[in-house]
Amino acid sequence: MATETPQVTNFLRNIIQEDLKNGKHETIVTRFPPEPNGYLHIGHAKSICLNFGLAKEFGGRCHLRFDDTNPVKEETEYIESIKESVRWLGFDWGRHLFYASDYFEQLYQWAEHLILNGKAYVDDLSAEEIRELRGTLTEPGKESPFRGRSVEENLALFRRMRAGEFPDGAKVLRAKIDMASPNMNLRDPVMYRIIHASHPHVGDAWRIYPMYDYAHGQSDAIEGVTHSICTLEFEDHKPLYEWFLANLPVPARPRQYEFARLNLSYTVMSKRKLLQLVQDGDVSGWDDPRMPTIMGLRRRGYTPESIRSFCERIGVGRSDSWIDMGILEESVREDLNERAPRAMAVLRPVKLVIENYPEGEVEEFSIANHPQKPELGSRTVPFCRELFIERDDFLEVPVKGFHRLAPGQEVRLRGAYIVQCTGVVKDEAGAVTEIRCSYDFETRSGLPGAERKVKGVIHWVSARHAVTAEVRLYDRLFSVPNPAGDDWKGFINPASVEILRDCRLEPSLARAGAEERFQFERQGYFCADLRETRPGAPVFNRTVTLRDSWSKGGKGA
């Protein structure tokens, strides 16, 4: 099994070590707090590995908490997929599963606390009017005409909002902070809005819902989180996070720390854009193997170990940067090179007939499952007069340096005999439909000619025993490193998937179970599809090619 990349220190590890050393905290408590409005992607994997990894490393605990404050965008499907993704990556929250919606009553009481202290008010302005009065980075905002309402009026209106007396958008509750603050997030941010919608976790109990910025920090405090770790885009929200904690009777004072989010080339990391790809039918779903979602990567054949290794390898810093997709691909190559058994699969078959081989005879060759790992054993592969080989392994007019099969040219059939091409059969259009050859009996393993050298070695499968399978050749979803702009979907790679339905595989692969991974010799790493493979009718997804075909400006394999 592949070993994972050794831990490299980072500023968050240093902070936690110092906090423990100074006695600031006895137990480290982190949390991973996704909003259940989509599937998790590789960027979330970095946060999962960081939060759960730090808690484990320092003997603490990590909570899984759903910051479920917007019922319009949240679904039970997303909640369950998030749980599955975190577990699959190898992490366990134990009994520490929480929902921000479980704290709605407490959050409501604290909102009333702010109203009673003159620090929150009910505003009748529309969302558009609030934006217009908010100001700009260089100009202060303007106060709402409803900012001066009395405590009694605000409290009565807020309670009526909770009771469901007003329609969506009619009123909001805002914190009363500073409309001239240079930090836009402190210009009387909205705390509550009216939404008449059923919530996936608490049902129809509420008609008002807290904003994320209000619920998040207080949820951290309720749970006793010590280190609230988030990405850099929340750095400007930190003063608001701290303002709420300072002005409410919370049981704890967590600290927020920011790190750089993961920007990965040749894909998009915005859940809004990923949702658009799903809704527009550009992909088959959130778990399409071309998607950067954790479930998509899993279905494609990535291992949890390779993703954890990738997250450790790229490190944790404070400066935004782009990570090349090739680093993620190399992580899974390295892992699968160690763990994946080898097999022979002919993806674009053409028949090879050995004319001097006895008709009806069948031999069995024992071939190692892994050339460097004898502990993985071997399997027997049947051999007979008619085989399938890759169409690309034959050229009727070979070019210089072509060491595979051509008229008069010899190759070794992997693990079997040396054969020489003696002729071809063509159809009416002139396409080669069959390759004829002869074999050298003495070149079988254990016989005197076994050591005879030829320049080319190709893989094959027995035509009589081969399993017919569907194989999907996946590649990068986008053809440019940064698909940005209004026309970002115009950069979708038209060759991001090629479906081959007449592939011929060695018979052992008929028994492949969902998510079993193999190296198809000379082809790449493949995984039996999690959703669609069936006994006797396998469907394989290409995880990654054997070599990086993009690093020198290419467009993939």
Image: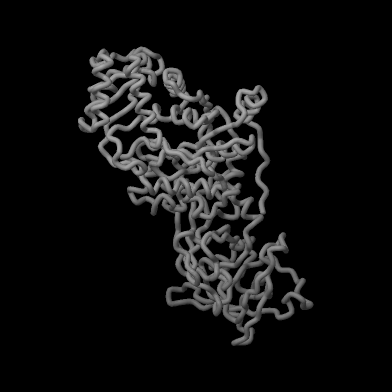
* Residue 342 image point, x, y percent: 63, 63
Depth check: 412 or 55 in front?
Answer: 55
In the picture, measured across the screen, residue 479 lies left or right of residue 354, that is left
Residue 320 can be seen, yes or no: no
* Residue 464 image point, x, y percent: 55, 80
* Picture layout, residue 286 above or below residue 130: below
The quarter of the picture where residue 249 lies is: top left
Depth check: 138 or 444 in front?
Answer: 138
* Residue 520 image point, x, y percent: 59, 62
Depth check: 360 or 529 in front?
Answer: 529
Residue 417 can be seen, yes or no: yes
* Picture layout, residue 261 above or below residue 511: above
Q: Which residue is drawn at 49% across and 60% down?
A: 529
* Residue 74 image point, x, y percent: 36, 42
Display colour scheme = one colour
In the picture, measured across the screen, residue 174 lies left or right of residue 383, that is left
Depth check: 230 or 503 in front?
Answer: 230
The quarter of the picture where residue 444 lies is: bottom right
Q: Which quadrant, please, contains the N terminus? A: bottom right
* Picture layout, residue 385 above or below residue 161: below
Residue positioned most to the bottom: 359
Q: Which residue is drawn at 40% across and 27% down?
A: 213
